[in-house]
Image (tube, rainbow, N blue to C red):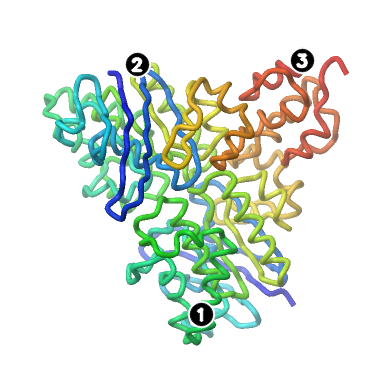
Amino acid sequence: MKIQIDNLRFTYPTGLEVLRGISLSIEAGEQVAIVGQNGAGKTTLVRHFNGLLQPASGSVMIGDWDTKKTSVAKLASRVGYVFQNPDEQLFSKDVATEIRFGPRNLGYSKEKIDELVTRALALTELSDKTETNPYDLSPTWRKMVALASVIAMDTPIVIFDEPTTGQDAVNVARIAHVIAELHREGKTVITITHDIDFCAENFERVIALSKGQILLDGPAREVLGQEEILAQTYVDPPQLTRLGKRLGLKETVRNQDEFLSAMRK
Amino acid sequence: MAFINLQNVTYQYPLTKTPVLQNINLQVNEGEFVAVIGPNGAGKSTLCYALAGFVPHFFKGEISGSIEVAGVESSKSTLDEWVMNVGLAFQNPFNQISGAKYTVFEEIAFGLENSGVPREEMKARVEEAMKLTDISDLADRSPYSLSGGQQQRVALTSILVMQPKLLVLDEPTSQMDPIGTREVFSVVRKMAEGGMTVVMVEHKMEWIAQFADRVIALKDGQILLEGKPNEVLTSNILAENGFGVSRYTSTAREAKKQGLWRKENLPVTLDEAVEGFVKRDE
């Protein structure tokens, strides 16, 4: 499912223009990270993908659907969106009901719903918490419930808005595993993140936004090495990329394996 | 005498079966900047609440041991007395914003209004605090129209403006961009230099190592390790207990096995890392 965005502009009712001419396309199955300073327009941009926001001008196409002519309910079958704050998203009395809600609304058969829910629970390691009220769980596990409830909808496109915020190392690894698994299934995953090391280790393509425009867009290795340009949108290159530069390595390294093998050369 | 003095503090929330803080002993000096790290569920936020008086005054539950800040014992004080000394920035800024104010400027003035600060002084202090955290341009926006990271800066500013003796910060940079994060650490450092005592829960080891005086590693409600940032943050015990570590530390640990790290101590910051890595051909 391709995402095609042409010259997208968006202004909030207060008069603040947050997106100022965004054009980009994302092919089916891509793993894309969106980075950039607070207020750059990252969340505003992705909320156009599932129709929560409508362009002031320009267009957003999800496959052959124009988001201006498609309801949010219909778009939900193609685009799943995990909110930055799980509390904006969760409302059911127990975890199982919460996770069943999405696929049930998409009209899947009972067998398919059972299968999707079981898979989502297993992937997010929530199988032993199905009867718990989401608000009795810690924020960490509430985040996993939010992830599971969107994964269970089995949409071809999944968006995560800052999934690693406030998560410890163990849970960040869990989330990285979820993303890898969705990638293996051929889904498009778009993730907003400030965790640039997480970005470097899990995404092939990186888009840097600054003040409502695209500053950089390309393979992670190219984008994350551009220290001066990234600084314009308050982003530092990943730790090991910075270290590689300081040590005079010729190539841009993104993770431990790349760094150590460059040091052995 | 220590500015913060926790003696054998054990605390259990109402309706729960196990204590979330167990036998915590902690002394912090005036003007010290202490970072608290730990996996999710370690009791970090509860420790913040205990310092800020919410535990037990607001959350109730069972507490034993004693919590003393600035020579006053928590159990002998009330929450409205306590907040005159201690400011807490919540983990989720959305939970902190009052909902009673239309603009960021008014939101930041809210605490000062409630403590009866004269109008002119209040305006000057709000402007100064906004300058410090670099949010002057947000003054007329609605707090609810802001991005997560901007909201977090507003939440922090509305505490800084109160000039508390003890500043307690629960993951204040979790939604901030990397350079914003560094700025917050540097502002907090400046506050500590000026005599404010700071306890900050954080996951970002590189900046903790650079800015904090001391690190407390918490796990399962107990203090697992405590000491100078570099010592604690490079300890094998952390890696074995599910704590996040800086990429410099984990990579150097691996590099040491391959002969690519030449120093005894592992690095946490970029500068430390630059000094110790060696290329094979050198």
Mark 1 highlights which residue?
B122
Disc 2 packing (10 Å; few <14; some 14–19; many ≥20): some
- Where does the image place residue A35, in percent across and percent down from the top left? 48, 36
On the same chain, marks 3 and 1? The answer is: no
Instruction: Evaluate if marks 2 and 3 touch, with contact meaning CB atoms under 8 Å apart.
Output: no
- Where does the image place residue A227, in percent across and percent down from the top left? 63, 32
Local SS, label 1: helix
What kind of residue is marked 1?
A: Met
Q: In this view, does B207 lie above or below A121?
A: below
Q: Is residue A210 above or below residue B46?
A: above
Mark 3 highlights which residue?
A264
Q: For the residues carrying marks 3 and 1, which lies nearer the camera in this image?
A: 1
Mark 2 highlights which residue?
A186
Q: For the residues carrying marks 1 and 2, which lies nearer the camera in this image?
A: 1
What kind of residue is marked 2?
A: Gly
Instruction: Evaluate if marks 1 and 2 touch, with contact meaning CB atoms under 8 Å apart.
Output: no
